[in-house]
Amino acid sequence: MITLYAIQHKPTGHFLPASNRKRRGYTNDKPKDPLKVPPRLFRRKGDAKNALRWWLKGITHVSYVGSYDDYNEDWHTKPAPDRKAEEMEVVPMRLTYDD
């Protein structure tokens, strides 16, 4: 058995999803039904808490300015006031398998 961690939206029971087809970063995602989209899993609880902290801040974008060899990253986060910490929690998920 392996214990992994996921981020759950308590009111709906939905989870932040594993797949992100848009490739825009996980802060762009919304909780999804785990029967339709698998939840994003973390090996350590602290990693899940860190991801939740970033998600609660809002939608993060990174712009690259400069050349291929010499560039600066411009990080900015658009607040998402509808995201509430009290509605989210990190929950353990137990994965079992046969030897």
Image (tube, grey):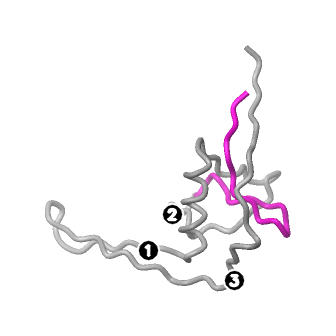
Q: Which residues are magenta?
A: 1-20
Label 1–label 2 contact, CB within 8 A: yes
Q: Does dot 2 land on a helix, a strand or a loop?
A: loop
Q: Does dot 3 land on a helix, a strand or a loop?
A: loop
Label 1–label 3 contact, CB within 8 A: no
Number of marks in picture? 3
- Give amino acid for label 2: Gly
Whether 45 is drawn above or below 61: the answer is above
Badge number at residue 61: 1
Residue denoted by label 2:
25
Q: Residue at x 47, y 79 (%)?
A: 77
Q: Does dot 1 land on a helix, a strand or a loop?
A: strand
Discs 2/3, front: 3
Q: Residue at x 29, y 70 (%)?
A: 73
* Disc nearer the start of the sequence (1/2): 2
Label 3 crowd (10 A; few <14 / some 14-19 / many >=20): few
